[in-house]
Image (cartoon, coloured by chain):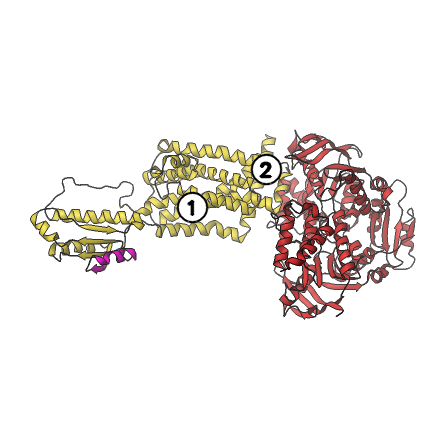
């Protein structure tokens, strides 16, 4: 048998939160080859999870056939489940049980014979590098470690097919690399068939075959090489004029969807994909001061092209661009003066030091990125900066106000957009905006005017119920709320996790234009390539500041390790920082 | 002045938001009215110590006119319903054990002779003590029938008791129970509502968004407390109307004093609820804490059993129970027409509880360790 999964005209419909049915999987036919890595890629809501749950026999298809390992899953789900291992996005670890107890439990559940366990466990613990932590409760592990343990528990027996649903979501680059090492080893040594869904193109690049999904439909399939071919000849790198940040050039390019399909800042340059229409003088005009050189195409380029084509086909509006998406915020004061001053900041929880003596300054109008692996202390630092968590010691100054003495005043000068949607779901868009405007001290006509302006800027329908908005619109509402009082400083906590690449581009376009208007931005992110939009970044690990500077300087710091992009620079710096003390979990 | 207006305006926005969030959810809307309505009716009809239908059995071993007349008097009350006439004392055990009769009256064979000879004629009443409250009332009733029978025989008791029940002339337990419900039913909902209010926001992540605004803990406290208090008073009013107009229990006291009492009482309850909410990480925890609290609050309140009957240590504990003073206030104002000076003492523990729990909650909003 050469195919592990064969789907024909598969369909699954759900009822959306607004009560209307939508097709999560829409007429999908595919065949997955055995003995290799297969990737399902696509933005959130593409249908990857639904498809995987159907493969695992947890959901019944509404129409079409689905055969897994030669068996019709809908007819005999148990027969299939006995031969596969499925790791859902949130694996069910028992947080109060130790690492070993979790492994034992899953081995019991799967009826793994005792004589096979010893060898299997030691292999799993060795591969995940967790032999030292067998006695530690699973709840006390970091996010990346939990994910590795989840994988180990999934693999307590040798399945004929392994299904992994976004194993690397919310996992820092180091743990991500470790996870993939394990998967790769299994494929190489045991000829295991693995189906993995992912939002990261560098992960899909490692797979034998890639299926691209969008809104429940299969857009394209093929090996990474074939898919990449779609972007052949269209990919270039442009160098911005001396002294201007790459993101200014990126903004200029992405604001011309008629000429440019996609543009992202990278390593001080701008990588872009041009439209496939011969020599265009208008493009040459656009790039008059920025020499462009061709670069090899990547899977990411092909993916972005597919999404843009499909987005248009479905009648999606091109991302709002230019000045109309840039909120008009008037900031007084000179660019360049420090608006955030952090000196010797310390935060302890009991005898655990979450943030150790950290100092930095952020200048007005800067975009400042806070990066670090899971549990590195960046969330703690972030929460202290926006006044959600008191500092144990140290000096903290925001917008010229001491955060220890004038907390309420300082809070009035900042805006905050949290990682998950944190507005009142059963209130309408207008009611949410009015409430927060009121909480920031706006009243009467001023409030009405500000809310109207905000609705207009972010293109929001005032009457819709906030909780039912699509993810991208929730993001917009969160931004509108964070900016309702025209703050000097905007705090963004992993603002782009869970939104698709197109929405991410639009989002960053708004951010860069805010910064151009003098708003200071503090942002945390898991997407290392997003650090390229920042003026300066700080990398934290184990509570300590490991690197601080422009993306260029940070890459330089990691240059010895041959790091080209932000992702490898990040890994190199964190590893250098950990070396003297040995690996910390 | 300007600062004060701004301070109050922010609270106004918070209250408006809370009320909107509360009433926009249809499930919430029905939760506000239905349980109060249902419980008021259930308690009104269901929770009743009054004797209306007491099953009993008779074992008449004398088979004489005197015994027959006594039994006829018992039957004639309309309260006692004879389910069996026994023929031998062996049958008594079964009647009581199976719960077929609440009491068995056993008339000895020499009953008539003794009466005729003018000596004492003992009458045995066997009661089902598993249901002590009703059994005791039934026994009392039987003894009063016997007393009046004695009188008819021309043996007036040396000391006759002439009973006048004040504030509840017909001694209906509904009169005792229902006014207390004005306080006790609404406290459940108010406590729960307050307990969920912050916990829900913490769980959904909206609390962080609220804490990064310039709102001060005191403003958040007032903004959270006022809607809960309004809902509590609304529920109390619903129950008050049902008691007044459906069950027609007359109210003697002043409406103003009643509402003043209810306001202070609800304030204390909301204080406890918000403190629970401020320490809870999520809604599940908040629910658990409030359920754990509601039971002892009810038991130690004097709603069902008088506080005076409790052991000393529990009596002391009741000082921390707002429901004890809430119920006392409502009962006394409603039934006995107490004026402020009569019940002033009840306000003190309530105000103390509110003065401790409300600032505690405000402090916990920000200082609960994440």
Tell me, yes or no, whether dots 1 and 2 are on the same chain.
Answer: yes
Q: Which mark is residue B368?
A: 2
Q: Residue at x 46, y 34 (%)?
A: B353
Q: Is residue B99 magenta?
A: yes
Query: Which label sits in the foreground, 1 or 2?
Result: 2
Residue A540 percent coordinates (x, y)? 75, 39
Q: Secondary structure at mark 2?
A: loop
Q: Nearer the viewer, residue A477 or A84?
A: A84
CA–CA distance in space, label 1 to label 2: 30 Å
Badge 2: residue crowd in 10 Å (few <14, some 14–19, many ≥20): few
Q: Nearer the viewer, residue A375 or A462?
A: A375
Res. A364 in view: yes
- The magenta span reads B84-101
Q: Which residue is mark 1?
A: B185
Residue B324 percent coordinates (x, y)? 40, 38
- Name chain B's colour: yellow
Disc 2 sits on a residue from what chain?
B
- Name chain A's colour: red
Residue B266 percent coordinates (x, y)? 46, 39
Disc 1 sits on a residue from what chain?
B
Viewport quadrant of the C terminus of chain B: top right
Q: Is residue A25 above or below residue B111?
A: below
CB contact under 8 Å: marks 1 and 2: no
Mark earlier in primary sequence (1, 2)? 1
- A122 sits left or right of B275 in the view: right
Residue B226 percent coordinates (x, y)? 51, 40
Q: Which mark is residue A317?
A: none
Q: Secondary structure at mark 1?
A: helix
Q: Is residue B13 magenta?
A: no
């Amino acid at each position: 048998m050469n195919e592990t999964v064969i789907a024909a005209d598969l369909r699954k419909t759900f009822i959306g939160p607004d009560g209307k049915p939508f097709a999560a999987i829409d007429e999908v036919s595919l065949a997955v080859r055995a003995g290799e890595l297969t990737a399902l890629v696509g933005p959130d809501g593409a249908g990857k999870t639904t498809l995987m749950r159907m493969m695992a026999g947890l959901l019944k298809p509404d129409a079409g056939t689905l055969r897994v390992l030669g068996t019709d899953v809908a007819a005999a789900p148990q027969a299939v489940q006995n031969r596969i291992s499925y790791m859902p996005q949130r694996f069910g670890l028992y947080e109060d049980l130790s690492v070993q107890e979790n492994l034992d439990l899953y081995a019991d559940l799967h009826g793994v014979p005792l004589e096979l366990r010893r060898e299997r466990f030691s292999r799993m613990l060795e591969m995940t590098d967790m032999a030292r932590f067998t006695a530690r409760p699973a709840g006390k592990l970091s996010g990346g470690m939990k994910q590795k343990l989840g994988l180990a528990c999934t693999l307590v027996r040798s399945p004929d097919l392994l299904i992994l649903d976004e194993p690397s979501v919310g996992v820092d680059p180091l743990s991500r690399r470790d996870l993939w090492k394990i998967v790769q080893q299994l494929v190489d040594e045991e000829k295991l068939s693995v189906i993995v869904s992912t939002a990261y193109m560098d992960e899909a690049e490692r797979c034998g075959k890639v299926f691209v999904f969008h809104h429940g439909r299969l857009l394209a399939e093929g090996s990474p090489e074939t898919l990449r071919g779609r972007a052949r000849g269209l990919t270039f790198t442009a160098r911005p004029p001396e002294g201007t940040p790459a993101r200014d050039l990126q903004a200029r390019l992405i604001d011309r969807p008629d000429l440019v399909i996609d543009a992202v800042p990278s390593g001080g340059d701008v990588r872009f994909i041009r439209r496939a229409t011969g020599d265009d003088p208008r493009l040459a005009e656009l790039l008059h001061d920025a020499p462009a050189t061709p670069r090899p195409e990547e899977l990411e380029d092909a993916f972005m092209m597919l999404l843009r084509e499909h987005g248009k086909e479905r009648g999606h509006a091109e991302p709002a661009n230019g000045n109309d998406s840039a909120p008009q915020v008037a900031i007084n004061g000179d660019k360049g003066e420090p608006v955030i001053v952090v000196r010797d900041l310390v935060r302890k929880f009991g005898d655990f030091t979450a943030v150790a003596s950290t100092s930095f300054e952020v200048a007005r109008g800067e975009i400042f990125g806070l990066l670090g692996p899971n549990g590195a202390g960046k969330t703690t630092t972030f929460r202290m900066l926006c006044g959600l968590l008191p500092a144990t010691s140290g000096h903290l100054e925001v917008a010229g106000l001491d955060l220890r003495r004038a907390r309420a005043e300082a809070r009035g000068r900042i805006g905050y957009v949290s990682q998950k949607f944190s507005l009142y779901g059963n209130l309408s868009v207008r009611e949410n905006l009015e409430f927060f405007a009121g909480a920031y001290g706006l009243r009467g006509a001023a409030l009405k005017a500000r809310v109207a302006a905000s609705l207009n800027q972010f293109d929001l329908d005032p009457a819709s119920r906030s909780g039912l908005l699509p993810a991208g619109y929730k993001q917009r509402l969160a931004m509108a709320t964070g900016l309702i009082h025209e703050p000097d400083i905007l705090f963004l906590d992993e603002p782009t996790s869970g939104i698709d690449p197109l929405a991410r581009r639009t989002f960053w376009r708004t951010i860069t234009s805010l910064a151009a208007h003098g708003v200071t931005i503090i942002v945390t992110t898991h997407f290392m390539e997003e650090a390229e939009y920042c003026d300066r970044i700080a990398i934290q690990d184990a509570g300590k500041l490991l690197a601080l500077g422009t993306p260029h300087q940070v890459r330089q710091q990691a240059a010895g390790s041959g790091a080209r992009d932000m992702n490898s620079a990040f890994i190199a710096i964190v590893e250098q920082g950990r070396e003297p003390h040995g690996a910390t979990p | 002045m300007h600062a004060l207006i701004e301070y109050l305006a922010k609270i106004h926005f918070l209250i408006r938001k809370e009320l909107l969030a509360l009433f926009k959810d249809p499930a919430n809307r029905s939760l506000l009215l239905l349980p109060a309505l249902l419980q008021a009716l259930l308690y009104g009809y269901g929770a009743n110590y009054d004797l209306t239908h007491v099953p009993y059995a008779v074992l008449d071993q004398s088979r004489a006119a005197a015994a027959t007349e006594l039994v006829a008097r018992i039957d004639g009350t309309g309260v006692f319903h004879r389910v069996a006439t026994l023929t031998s004392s062996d049958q008594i055990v079964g009647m009581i054990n199976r719960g077929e009769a609440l009491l068995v009256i056993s008339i000895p064979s020499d009953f008539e002779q003794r009466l005729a000879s003018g000596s004492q004629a003992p009458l045995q009443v066997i009661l089902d003590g598993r249901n002590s409250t009703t059994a005791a009332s039934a026994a009392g009733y039987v003894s009063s029938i016997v007393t009046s029978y004695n009188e008819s025989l021309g043996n007036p008791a040396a000391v006759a008791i002439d009973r006048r029940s004040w504030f509840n002339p017909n001694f209906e337990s509904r009169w005792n129970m229902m006014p207390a419900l004005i306080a006790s039913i609404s406290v459940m909902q108010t406590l729960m509502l307050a307990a969920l209010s912050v916990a829900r926001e913490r769980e959904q992540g909206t609390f962080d968004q609220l804490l990064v605004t310039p709102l001060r803990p005191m403003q958040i406290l007032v903004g959270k407390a006022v809607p809960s208090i309004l809902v509590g008073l609304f529920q109390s009013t619903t129950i008050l109307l049902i008691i007044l107009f459906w069950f027609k229990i007359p109210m003697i006291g002043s409406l103003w004093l009643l509402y003043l009492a209810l306001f202070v009482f609800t304030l204390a309850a909301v204080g406890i609820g918000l403190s629970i909410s401020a320490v809870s990480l999520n809604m599940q925890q908040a629910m658990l804490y409030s359920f754990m609290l509601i039971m002892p609050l009810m038991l130690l309140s004097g709603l069902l059993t008088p506080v005076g009957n409790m052991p000393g240590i529990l009596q002391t504990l009741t000082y921390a129970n707002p429901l004890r003073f809430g119920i006392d206030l409502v009962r006394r104002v409603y039934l006995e027409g107490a004026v402020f000076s009569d019940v002033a003492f009840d306000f003190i523990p309530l105000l103390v509880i509110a003065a401790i729990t409300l600032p505690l909650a405000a402090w916990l909003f920000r200082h609960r360790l994440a």
